[in-house]
Image (cartoon, grey):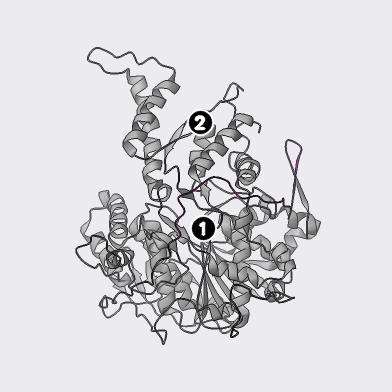
Amino acid sequence: MEASSLSSAFNITSNNTVRLSNNKLGGGCSLKVKKKVNVCCQSGKKAIKSSGSSSLITERSSTLMNADQGAALMETSLSFAPNGSTQTEIEVKDLVPYSHGTSTSLVERPADGIGITNFLGGKTFLVTGATGFLGKVLVEKILRTAPDVHKIYILIKAKNKEVAIERVKNEIIEAELFECLRQTYGKSYQAFMLSKIVPVIGNVCEANLGLDEDTTHMLAKEVDIIVNSAANTTFDERYDVALDINTGGPSRLMSFAKQCHRIQLFLQVSTAYVNGRRQGTVMEKPFSAGESIARESLLFGADCIFLPTLNVEDEIKLVIESKQAIDDSVLAQRMKSLGLERANKFGWQDTYVFTKAMGEMMIDSLRGDIPVVIIRPSVIESTYREPFPGWIEGSRMMDPVLLYYGKGQLSGFLADPNGVLDVVPADMVVNAILAAMAKHGEAGKSGSNIYQIASSVVNPLVFKDLATLLYEHFNSSPCFDSKGKPIRVPKMELFRSMEDFSTHLRRDAISRSGLAASPHPGGKMSGKLESICRKSVEQAEYLANLYEPYTFYGGRFDNSNTHLLMGYMSKEERRKFGFDVENIDWKDYISNIHIPGLRRHVMKGRLGRS
C-alpha cells in the first residue's frame, strides 16, 4: 500500500515500515432525448407500492453489546479519544420537539420546515468523491437549489492544477447530469460552474489529505461542511487497499476537520450494509470502537466458541505484518483473501462493508465535539426524478444481472424468491443528505446521527416480483441482437442453492450455444462448446458468489430516524427535497425509469431501441 495511512498520524509505507507524520496546520427544465422522449427535470408521478408478499422480518434487534477495546498497536498507533459518555442509541428528543405528553410519532411540522435552502446559502463545502456517481448528483442538487452557495471545494487526485481543472470540466461540467443548469445559465454556464466548484489537489489516502501548507490554511479558514463520499466499493477488494480508503480516509478527514475553524458538520456517506450479518429489523444505531457483529451473534445464542474482539489498530498491524511476509507475486490475491477472512470472522459479509463499518468506528472515536451525520443508503440506483429520471453512471449492483438477462445471456439467478432487494434512487439519497445536513448543521449539537435511506421495511422490492417485472419489460421492450432481431427472454428462474444454479447455467449455456451436445469418443463435449459453457458458467457463478450475501440477506433496514427527519420538513421542502421511498412505484421505476436509463446512459443505445 504505497504512501498509505490509517490516520493522520499513522502511515503504512511502500517498504512496510511505520512512521509518524507531523500534521500541523501548517427551478425546472427539460432534457430532450432520443425516441421522442421528453425527460422533464423535477417531474413526478403518483406512486403505487409494489405488490406481492415478502419475507419481511419485523422483530426489532436488541441493544448492541459494546466490546472491550483491544490493546494499543504500538506507541505510534492511533488513539481513541473518549466522547465523554457511553455511546448509546440516538435519543428521540434529539430528533423531534420534546414535550411532555406529546406523541413523538405526531411531530408538528414547522411552517418554514428545516430551512434547507437557507442553510446551504453562503456555505463552503469540502467534498470527497465528487466525481463519482452519488457525488455528482449531490453537487448538481446543491448548485441548482442553492446557487448562492459560496464554494464547493472538491478533493481530486491530479498532477497539477491544470489537470485538476480539466478533470472538473470533463467529469462534472460536461456531464449530461448538469443539463438543467446548462439550460438555466446558457452561455455563462461554465463560468458559473468554475466560480462555485474549486478543485483541490489531494488524496484521502495520504497524511493531511495530501494538501500543501497554503491549501491547508485556506481550507481551515473557509470550510463549513465536510462531506466524505469517497470509497472503494469493490466487495472483494484487497484488504490493504479497502482499509486505506474506507477506514483510513474518514480518519484523516476527521483529523482535518478538527483544524477547520468554522466547521459545522462532518457528513459521512456510508452504506446500510455496514450492519453486516445482523438479522431482522436493523435499527439506526452508531458503531462504537470494538463492536463486532459476531459478538452480537454470540450474545443472542449463536454457536460461537469465543468472542472475537475487533480492534482497528490490530487490523492495521496485521496488514503490515502480512505484507512483509507475503511474496509480491501472490500479494494481491492474499490481500483479497485476508480481507474476506477478517470480515467473516467478525460478522461482516465482505471486505467493503467491513472496512466501511470500521470507518464509522473511527469517526465516532475521533469526532470530539464535531456534529456528525452518517448517511447509510442501501443499493443506490438511477435517479427517480431529479434532475431528470433515470440518470445513472456505471453499472451498479443489480445492473449486470439485469443486462445479462435482457440480452438473453442469463435466464436465472441465485436468490431467495421471497427475499428483498433493498434499492433507493440516487436523488432521494442526496435529498436526505441535504435535509440531515441542514438540520444538524444548524443545531450545532455534538453527537453522531444515523440515517438509513432504505426501502426494505417500508416498501420492499421482492426478488420474485422483480423477476416478473424484468420478464414483462424485456418482452414488451426487447433488446436486439447484432442482426437487429428482438431477443425474447424466458421467465427468470430464481435458485436457492448454488448447485441447482450451476446445473441450470450449464444446461442454459449449451442451449444458447446452438451446438448439439454431441460427445466425442470418451464422452467429452467439443472443445468449442466446452469453452463457451465454461466461460458463461464461470462468469455467472462469480456474480452469484459475490452477491449471495445480499440476495439472501436476512436484515431489513429500519428508517425511523429518516421518517422523523421528513416530519421536520415543510410541504415545499418535501416537494423539492423529498425522499419518501415508501411511495415509489417499483413497476414504474424499474420499467419506465431505471432500465431506459441504463440503456441510454450506460449502454449508450447498444441494446437496441426500447
Asked if residue 305 lies left or right of residue 359, the reply is left
From the top left corner, tell me how far across and down residue 7 is, in percent. Answer: 39, 73
Instruction: Provide the residue designation for mark 1.
Output: 457
Instruction: Provide the residue designation for mark 2.
Output: 491
Query: Label 2 to label 1, Cα distance in Å?
Result: 27 Å
Magenta residue check for 105: no
What residue type is disc 1 on?
Answer: Val
Asked if residue 95 lies left or right of residue 121, the reply is left
From the top left corner, tell me how far across and down residue 130 is, in percent. Answer: 57, 61
**Quadrant of residue 348 within the rendered picture:** bottom left
Residue, x 46% and y 83% (percent of image)?
368
State the extent of the magenta-drawn residues as a range: 33-58
Q: Look at the image and tell me in which quarter the N terminus lies.
A: bottom left
Magenta-drawn stretch, dominant element (helix, strand or loop):
loop
Asked if residue 442 lies left or right of residue 258, the reply is right
Residue sitting at the far bottom:
84
Q: Look at the image and tell me in which quarter the C terminus lies.
A: top right
Magenta residue check for 45: yes
From the top left corner, tell me how far across and down residue 8 is, in percent. Answer: 41, 75
Residue, x 27% and y 81% (percent of image)?
75
Q: Residues within 10 Å of mark 2 (few under 14, many from 20)?
A: some
Nearer the observer, 219 or 578: 578
**Is label 2 in a helix, a strand or a loop?**
loop
